[in-house]
Image (tube, rainbow, N blue to C red):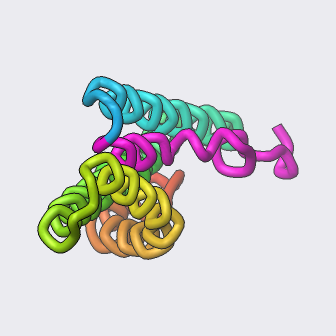
Amino acid sequence: MGAAEPDLYRDTWVRYLGYANEVGESFRPLVPVPVVWASYGVATAYVTADAIDKGRRAATVHVQDPAQATRVGVAVVDTFVWQSLASVAIPGFTINRLCAASLALLGTLTRWPLPLRRWATTALGLAAIPVIITPIDRTVDFLMDSSLRKLYGAPGEPPAPH
């Protein structure tokens, strides 16, 4: 595996699967709840596959390293926790609350019929997705750098000896 090999989970269309739950939350006013939960299943499968891939990559890079197992474990945990927060939990919650507030406010402030309010809420949720991505990613980087990553250093590196 060369350094020039594209990362399937970060450099191709596959990365958009990580946004499935935000799309599901945006459509919550229009679709049955099991459809929303299925979107979380897609996003969680993406997160899991990316974490496994990063572990596989760490194993290949550190094949002669006595700390290979630790480096693989760190790569998997770091990727899984980061992706779970930045791709699933925080954006899903954010879009859910934005859409719930939007639907409630439209019901209070307008005389629009319910179907129009639901479609407007969905459109707002979808439009918010690209706006929230970078701030959430940066926040998760900060949170991880300030907490979990202090235990093991940079992703893919073994914990510092005490």
Residue 108 seen in the figure: yes
Task: Name the residue located 45 percent from the left edge and 37 percent from the top edge.
Answer: 43
Residue 10, x across and y down, in percent:
66, 50
Query: Is the residue 41 above or below the residue 91 in the image?
Result: above
Q: Does any portion of residue 159 appear in the rendered image?
A: no
Relative placement, left or right, of 40 versus 113 is: right
As drawn, 80 above or below 127: above
Q: Image height check: is 60 above or below 38?
A: below
The residue sitting at 36% across, 73% down in the picture is 139
Q: Quadrant of residue 8?
A: top right
159 relative to 96 in the view: left or right: right
Residue 22 placement (x, y as % from top left)? 41, 49
Q: Tell how many labels.
A: 0
The residue depicted at 50 percent of the width and 57 percent of the height is 155
Q: Magenta stretch: residue 25 in it?
A: yes
- The quadrant of the rendering that contains the C terminus is bottom left
Range covered by the magenta-colored residues = 1-29
Q: Residue furthest left?
A: 108
Q: Quadrant of the N terminus?
A: top right
Q: Is residue 4 magenta?
A: yes
Residue at the image position 25 percent from the left and 50 percent from the top: 114
| Rendering coords of residue 7 (x, y %) | 72, 45
Q: Nearer the viewer, residue 110 or 37?
A: 110
Splitting the image into 4 quarters, where does residue 38 fall?
A: top left
- Asked where in the image residue 40 lies, by quadrant, the reply is top left
Q: Nearer the viewer, residue 18 or 8?
A: 18
Q: Position of residue 112 (x, y in %)?
A: 27, 61
Name the residue nearer the viewer: 156 or 36: 36
- Residue 78 relative to residue 55: left or right: left
